[in-house]
Amino acid sequence: MPTIVLFQPKIPPNTGNIMRLCSNTGFKLHLIRPLGFALDNKSLKRAKLDYISNTTPIMFNDLFSYCENIDINNLIIITKFGKKNYTEANFKNNSIIIFGSETNGLPKSFIDLHNRKTFKIPMVNGSRSLNLSNAVAIVVYEAWKNLNFSGAVL
């Protein structure tokens, strides 16, 4: 299944909700440090409920070194600066879908380096951003739909 990558997430309930989402869809979760909270944070536990046993995020120290250890061809970057709509992404079982932090997004140098792999979620003019866990949910279900809901009980 695809992997969701959160770059320096800051808000525990967002990450907890995403952990719960990954548990329910079979997607993997990677987190790039530093986090804005400890993984044992009470808010994180409340959001993910009892799903911790199904989703244990793998931690990484740096975005650029993380990318040195993956197949860049599988990279899908979700950013408000994306060149195409997320529905145009070619989601595969080995896709690596990266989201920026709630406060700072992704580094501009990273977006510039991988510009052709950037996608956005459409919003009305003047909107700043979506909540991170909502944005991840939108993209996860689009990706999963493209994979014919592989592994789901239908």
Image: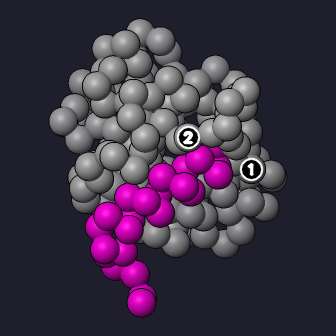
Image mark count: 2
- Please identify the quarter of the rendering in which residue 131 is found: top right
- Rendering coords of residue 122 (x, y %): 56, 40
Residue drawn at x 22%, y 32% is: 72
Q: Is residue 134 magenta?
A: yes
Residue 117 in percent (x, y) is at 31, 30
Q: Residue at x 68, y 30 (%)?
A: 125
Mark 1 — residue?
Answer: 13
- The reply to whether discs 2 and 1 touch (Cβ–Cβ < 8 Å) is no
For the residue pair 15 and 146, the one nearer the viewer reads as: 146
Q: Is residue 108 left or right of residue 137?
A: left
Circle number at residue 122: 2
Q: Secondary structure at mark 2?
A: loop
Q: Is residue 82 left or right of residue 105?
A: left
- In this view, the residue farthest toward the bottom is 154
Q: Residue at the spot x=64%, y=51% of the render?
A: 134
Q: Nearer the viewer, mark 2 or mark 1?
A: 2
Query: Magenta region: which residues?
Result: 132-154
Q: Quadrant of residue 146?
A: bottom left
Task: Please say whether residue 59 is visible from this viewpoint.
Answer: no
CA–CA distance in space, label 2 to label 1: 24 Å
Q: Regarding mark 1 in the picture, which secondary structure is present there?
A: helix
Q: Amino acid at mark 2?
A: Pro
Quarter of the image that includes the C terminus: bottom left
